[in-house]
Amino acid sequence: MKKISPKFIGIFFIVWGCAAILKSIYAGKYEQILWACWIGFILLGIGILRKDAWLTTSQLNILAIPWLFWSGDFIYRMFSGKSLLGITDYVFAPIPAIDLIITLAHIIALPLALIALYLLQLKRADAWKLSLIQLTLLFVITITFTTNTIDNKINCIYNPCIPLPIDLPFPLAWIIGSLIIVFLTNAILVKLFHSKKPQQNLFNTYKSPKSISPVV
């Protein structure tokens, strides 16, 4: 595990997030820069590079479960040829190669983020606070700068991104779903990665093989 460079992971998230946003601007689809996943990519990268497990966890609280749904839907569609939740149907339609390359980052995002969090070692259990603040801001900004249409699924605010088991009006369903996702994910991450004892940050123990001096 220590052989994996956390800096590389951080740079990956920032580059991929910026690439997605720049592609959206170039295509004139400005509303797509508001997607929580691409903003989260950049904030994850910043958190990892700053060795900030709290910031990293706050982004995973928002994105981990959606990434699981996305990956599960993609894998099912790829092997069965059938649509499951419909989340990744667009991937199998004719789309530009650059769009395909950028969106496939969803598959490896969660494993990489969890590896980074393991290396950082989580010391705080209240990252959910930042997650809720960020989601509130995203909600306000999304409804302010986008239009409520049947095809608008930006951050799943106007329309559900997956079929819901119960029929709730929006944004009530979005609010309840967001609270469940954040608190459930935070509890799981704290259970798995929280360190109560002072320990050396594994991020700082990483050394490139080239930086290790040979024993004479």
Image (cartoon, rainbow, N blue to C red):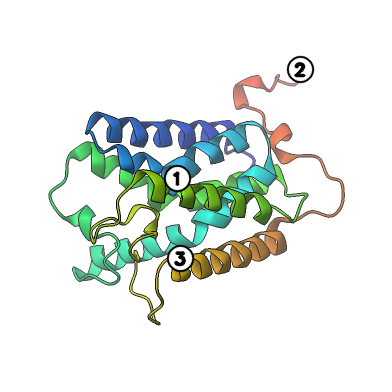
Q: Are marks 3 and 2 in contact (CB under 8 Å)?
A: no
Point out which mark residue 177 bears.
none
Question: How many numbered circles does the render carry?
Answer: 3
How far across and down, in percent of the image, does residue 6 sit?
A: 59, 36
Q: Residue furthest bottom?
A: 166
State the image quarter where residue 128 is shown: bottom right
Distance from label 3 to label 2 (Cα)? 62 Å
How far across and down, in percent of the image, does residue 148 sit?
A: 30, 56
Instruction: Write the residue at 57% across / 65% down.
Output: 179
Reading the chain from its start, which is encountered first: label 2 or label 1?
1
Q: Are marks 3 and 1 in contact (CB under 8 Å)?
A: no
Q: Is residue 104 left or right of residue 59?
A: left
Viewer-nearest of discs 3 and 1: 1
In-front residue for pair 169/91: 169
Q: Is residue 149 left or right of residue 8?
A: left
Q: Amino acid at mark 3?
A: Trp
The residue carrying mark 2 is: 216
Mark 2 surroundings: few (<14), some (14-19) or many (≥20) residues within 10 A: few
Q: Amino acid at mark 1?
A: Ile
The residue carrying mark 1 is: 141
